[in-house]
């Protein structure tokens, strides 16, 4: 990331990186996501929660090495540290596909329903485009600069589902990644096409916050055994704070796209 990139992320609350996922990796992520959706069926996303109008997968670090590369990408980790500082961890890695037929609309929200506190920002999200994000297929909308408002949309908006006069829509090609200060007001839009719009969401939190999906409990022993030292740090597997925080996590900690 350049200094200009960092300033843009800090000032506006978002940054779009182009062409992060190469063609082979993109195909692998799509193929593995499709396989998991077929295999898990009605259980898909059960480690998080269902969302009407969307397909979901959760706990993806436990389900394939190709997903580890998402949450450990150097540019993303650099951005995480710009927003959250040095004390951070992965909260969850989920898949979301806005389904066709005017489905997938979400209210404007801040992840975990949090505003910045005396320590600063606490939530960061990365949205990995597995398909092109077009004006019609349910791209993410956001209100630039709203991460500095100190408010959540539900406190000040009459209808968080309605269009916001200052909102923008994140458009891009499959392989692009949206980096967001997740205190910024944002939400998915309705998919008006005939095919799903697929993405991955690598969500990070400050070290003193609960993980959305408590990694130490969810990851199978064989998965934990193969993880590198870097991945153990990203997942905070050896952080004793997580044991006490875990009762507040496991799907209770906010809305993700």
Image (cartoon, rainbow, N blue to C red):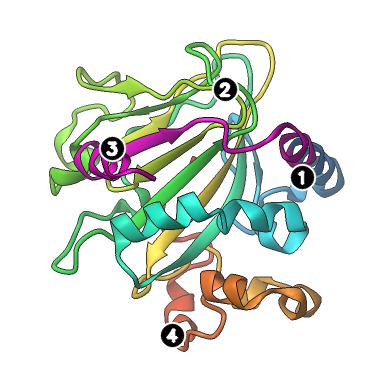
Q: Nearer the viewer, mark 3 or mark 1?
A: 3
Looking at the rendered structure, which numbered label has been put on residue 211?
Answer: none
- Residue 222: image quadrant is bottom right
Which residue corresponds to the image point at 33% horizontal and 26% vertical from the top-left?
161
Residue 3, above or below 138: below
218 horizontally vs 2: left or right: right
Residue 14 point in image, percent of width and height: 33, 38
State how far apart marks 4 and 3 are (Cα).
29 Å
Task: Give the class, few, some or many, for how many residues have Cα within 10 Å of label 3's Cα (few <14, many ≥20).
Answer: many
State how far apart marks 2 and 1 are (Cα).
30 Å
Residue 54 point in image, percent of width and height: 61, 33
The magenta region covers 1-29
Label 4 sits on residue: 244
Label 1 sits on residue: 42
Which residue corresponds to the image point at 29% horizontal and 18% vertical from the top-left?
163
Q: Do the residues bearing badges 3 and 1 touch, measured as CB atoms within 8 Å?
A: no
**Precedes in sequence: disc 2 or disc 4:** 2
Looking at the rendered structure, which numbered label has been put on residue 185?
Answer: 3
Front position in the image: 154 or 136: 136
**Precedes in sequence: disc 3 or disc 1:** 1
Residue 234 point in image, percent of width and height: 53, 69
Task: Give the class, few, some or many, for how many residues have Cα within 10 Å of label 1's Cα (few <14, many ≥20).
Answer: few
Residue 142 point in image, percent of width and height: 32, 30
Question: In this view of the protein, can residue 211 be seen by the observer?
Answer: yes
> Of helix, strand and loop, which one carries label 3?
loop
Label 2 sits on residue: 173
Question: In this view of the protein, can residue 49 be seen by the observer?
Answer: no
Q: Any magenta on residue 38?
A: no
């Amino acid at each position: 990331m350049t200094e200009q990139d960092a300033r843009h992320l800090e000032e506006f609350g978002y940054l779009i990186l182009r062409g992060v996922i190469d063609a082979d990796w993109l195909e692998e992520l799509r193929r593995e996501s499709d396989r998991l959706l077929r295999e898990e069926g009605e259980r898909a996303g059960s480690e998080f929660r269902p969302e009407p109008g969307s397909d979901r997968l959760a706990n993806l670090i436990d389900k394939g090495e190709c997903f580890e590369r998402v949450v450990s990408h150097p540019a993303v980790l650099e951005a995480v540290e710009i927003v959250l500082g040095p004390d951070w961890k992965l909260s969850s890695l989920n898949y979301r596909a806005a389904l066709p037929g005017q489905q997938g609309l979400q209210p404007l929200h801040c992840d975990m329903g949090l505003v910045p506190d005396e320590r600063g920002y606490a939530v960061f999200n990365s949205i990995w485009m597995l398909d092109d994000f077009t004006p019609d297929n349910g791209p993410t909308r956001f209100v630039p600069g709203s991460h500095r408002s100190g408010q959540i949309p539900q406190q000040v908006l009459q209808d968080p589902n309605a269009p916001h006069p200052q909102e923008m829509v994140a458009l891009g090609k499959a392989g692009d990644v949206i980096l967001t200060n997740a205190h910024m007001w944002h939400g998915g839009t309705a998919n008006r096409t005939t095919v799903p719009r697929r993405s991955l969401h690598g969500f990070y939190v400050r070290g003193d916050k609960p993980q959305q999906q408590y990694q130490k409990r969810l990851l199978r022993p064989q998965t934990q055994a193969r993880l590198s030292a870097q991945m153990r740090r990203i997942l905070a597997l050896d952080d004793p704070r997580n044991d006490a925080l875990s009762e507040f996590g496991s799907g209770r900690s906010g809305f993700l796209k």
